[in-house]
């Protein structure tokens, strides 16, 4: 279901430029370390303390629905389409726009495409297919 979302420094830099850091700080929490255990045995330790001094941003975790709500309210709600199936993405180098094609044949273009569609993201897969 995806109850949470982790935001890395590169995502936070962009989200900060778009004015989302206040809501991220309010709704989320910085991730300093993650310890992975199985029963009583620690398998690994992920240390994120070095991120902020290196990149200017830490790693943050927040409820996925909070991020979705913030994105929805920042966008003009009449331009938000829920339940649509993305089947194609066109983003030409040096072009200021990206075009999205839906399964029902509609096409939309804009300056930013947000693929907030989870761990099995079709947007991520389509973009990766274009790179590969």
Image (cartoon, helix red, strand yellow):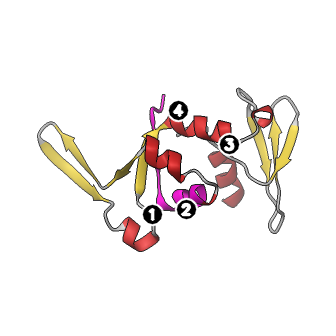
Q: Residue at x 52, y 40 (%)?
A: 119
Residue 80 to residue 91: above or below: above
**Label 3: few (<14), some or many (≥20) within 10 Å?**
few
- The numbered mark, 1 or 3, whose residue comes first in the sequence reads 1
Cα–Cα span, label 2 and label 3: 17 Å
Q: Nearer the viewer, mark 2 or mark 3?
A: 3
Q: CA distance from mark 1 to mark 2?
A: 7 Å
Q: Is residue 78 visible?
A: yes
Q: Earlier in the sequence, mark 1 or mark 4?
A: 1
Residue, disc 3: 74
Residue 27 among those drawn in magenta: no
Q: Are marks 1 and 2 in contact (CB under 8 Å)?
A: yes
Q: Residues within 10 Å of mark 1 (few under 14, many from 20)?
A: some
Q: CA distance from mark 1 to mark 3?
A: 22 Å
Secondary element type, mark 3: helix
- Outermost residue to the bottom: 54
Of the two numbered discs 1 and 2 on the same chain, state the one appearing first in sequence.
2
The mark found on residue 65 in the picture is 4
- For the point 78% across and 48% down, which residue is it? 89
Q: From the top left corner, tell me how far across and down residue 54 is, in percent.
A: 41, 73
Query: Measuring 13% from the left and 44% from the top, which residue is drawn there?
Result: 41
Up-down: is 14 above or below 37? below
The answer to whether residue 5 is visible is: no
Determine the image quadrant of residue 104: top right
Q: CA distance from mark 4 to mark 3?
A: 14 Å
Query: Foreground: 119 or 131?
Result: 119
Give the percent coordinates (x, y) of residue 33. Answer: 28, 54
């Amino acid at each position: 279901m995806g109850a949470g979302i982790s935001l890395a420094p590169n995502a936070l830099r962009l989200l900060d430029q778009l004015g989302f850091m206040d809501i991220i700080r309010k709704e989320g929490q910085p991730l300093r370390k993650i310890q992975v255990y199985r029963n009583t045995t620690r398998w690994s330790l992920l240390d994120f303390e070095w991120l902020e001094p290196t990149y200017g941003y830490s790693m943050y975790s927040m409820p996925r629905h909070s991020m979705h709500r913030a994105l929805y309210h920042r966008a003009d709600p009449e331009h938000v389409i829920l339940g649509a199936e993305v089947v194609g993405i066109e983003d030409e180098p040096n072009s200021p726009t990206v075009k999205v094609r839906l399964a029902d044949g509609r096409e939309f273009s804009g300056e930013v495409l947000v693929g907030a569609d989870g761990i099995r993201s079709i947007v991520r897969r389509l973009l990766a297919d274009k790179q590969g």
